[in-house]
Amino acid sequence: MREDQSVLPGRLVSLDAIRGVAVMGILAMNIVAFALPFPAYSNPAAGGPPSDIDLATWFFNFVFVDSKMRGMFSLLFGASTLLVIDSAAMAGRNPAGAHYSRMFWLALFGLAHFYLVWFGDILFLYAICGLLLFLFRNLSAKALLLWSLPFFLVGIGLPASLWAMLSMAQAGGLPAEAAAGMQEALRQMNADMGPSTPTYGKETALYLGSYASIVGHRTSAMAGDPLYFVGMFLWEAMGLMLIGMALFKSRMLTGDWSIARYRKWAIACFLIAIPPLVMLALYQMRSGYDAVAIFGASLALSIPFDTLMTVGWIALIMLLIKSVASDAVRERLAAAGRMAFTNYLVTSIVMTTIFYGYGLELFGSVGRAALYLFCFGMWTAMLLWSKPWLDRFQYGPFEWLWRSLSRGAVQPMRKSPPVQ
């Protein structure tokens, strides 16, 4: 998401187009959390045995979509951070002041999004990561990649350690005292992520309730979740953002690589990442969708391969943008990307209104596979409305608000008419 939307050089249209794909793609992973109880996000059997088509949809998502679209968003956030810092410096403004003002307001947007609209917010996490990103702005691409490694090591190591201990406790491989101490963690994990979990029915009842009851739940029982999410996901997100900064400095994200190089990277990343991700999906299925297996595969073991596939997706999208996409398609995608902040927030408003009790009350009643019809509809809306809006206005509505708040002054919104 990019708040500074002044006219970009032509070579950066590709970056906006990738961002457009990312803001549409993130709905493909979030749609389950919008429409079904949260245990279903990771576990296809959370509400009972899944149908064949729903299981196939989960399998495809785990291998190709889940975490990859969020990873793409994170990489692009890192790249956009460099763009905004450089833009502020070139305009004679204080880069640090401009950056930290943006992050302050982004954090507030994120908290408002979490408490008032949807619990799956990532803006607050990104704002906290942004406080650290500024420190890395002057590093070389190689140094950024090296710095990403310790963040990934912590992001993988913490959940992997917990998964290993829980697996040993299940198998009776821990001393009695240690195993007893893990029983509460196992009980909670089964409640949150296990098959046929009772949490499923409770969440269905909650989100079919009134707006006031849903917001009341977020501001009481879930009040500390934004900070919990930061502690859980900051390490991986920072690693991805640093990679994004490195890929921007190496000109991968600006469209300057050759078509052959993009093709080579896409093929290599997919060939390396797909086999282990398929094996991890099979591991979860063969466990009977056990909560510990779901946790380990989704939040620890898949991270290196998710990251590789994220880079592969970017290479593939850039390849298609450069070699296949028409000018009209590039323009539509780039417009959706320039309005990614607005499109992300509007998607949350639309989807919660469709599924929650204060809207169409569809929560919990649509199967996993059928949910993608709603994705197609929202993607179409993004592509149809973003370009006409930007033909008339300089920014998307929420981009304009973010920019105005960050600069402490109302920014011009309408485009000046062309000089005759």
Image: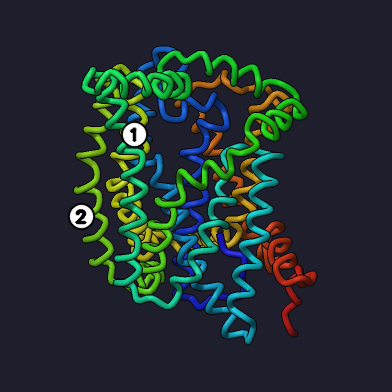
Of the numbered discs 2 and 1, the one sitting upstream in the chain is 1
Which part of the image, by quadrant, shows the C terminus? bottom right
Q: Position of residue 305 (x, y in %)?
A: 27, 46
Q: Residue 202: name its quadrant.
A: top right
Q: What amino acid is found at the position of numbered circle 1 in the picture? A: Leu
Q: Measure how far apart labels 2 and 1 are at the Cα level.
A: 31 Å
Residue at (31% x, 34% y) in the render? 297
Left or right relative to 263: residue 372: right
Q: Residue furthest right?
A: 410
For label 2, count other residues whose C-alpha is less than 10 Å away and answer few (under 14), some (14-19) or many (20+): some
How are the residues colored?
rainbow
- Secondary structure found at label 2: helix
Q: Residue 387: name its quadrant.
A: bottom right
What numbered label is drawn on residue 264? none
Residue with the mark numbered 2: 268
- Please state which of residues 116 and 219 is positioned toward the viewer in this rendering: 219
- Please state which of residues 47 and 385 is positioned toward the viewer in this rendering: 47
Q: What amino acid is found at the position of numbered circle 2 in the picture? A: Ala
For label 1, count other residues whose C-alpha is less than 10 Å away and answer few (under 14), some (14-19) or many (20+): some
Left or right relative to 122: residue 278: left
Which part of the image, by quadrant, shows the N terminus? bottom right
Residue at (63% x, 87% y) in the render? 92
- Labelled pair 2, 1 in contact (Cβ < 8 Å): no
Q: Position of residue 84 (x, y in %)?
A: 56, 72
Residue with the mark numbered 1: 162
Q: Position of residue 334 (x, y in %)?
A: 52, 62
Instruction: Examine the rendered structure and indicate whether residue 302 appears above or below residue 389.
Output: above
Is label 2 or label 1 in front?
A: 1
Instruction: Examine the rendered structure and indicate whether residue 386 appears above or below residue 356.
Output: below
Q: Residue 363: name its quadrant.
A: top right
- Please state which of residues 334 and 245 is positioned toward the viewer in this rendering: 245
- Secondary structure found at label 1: helix
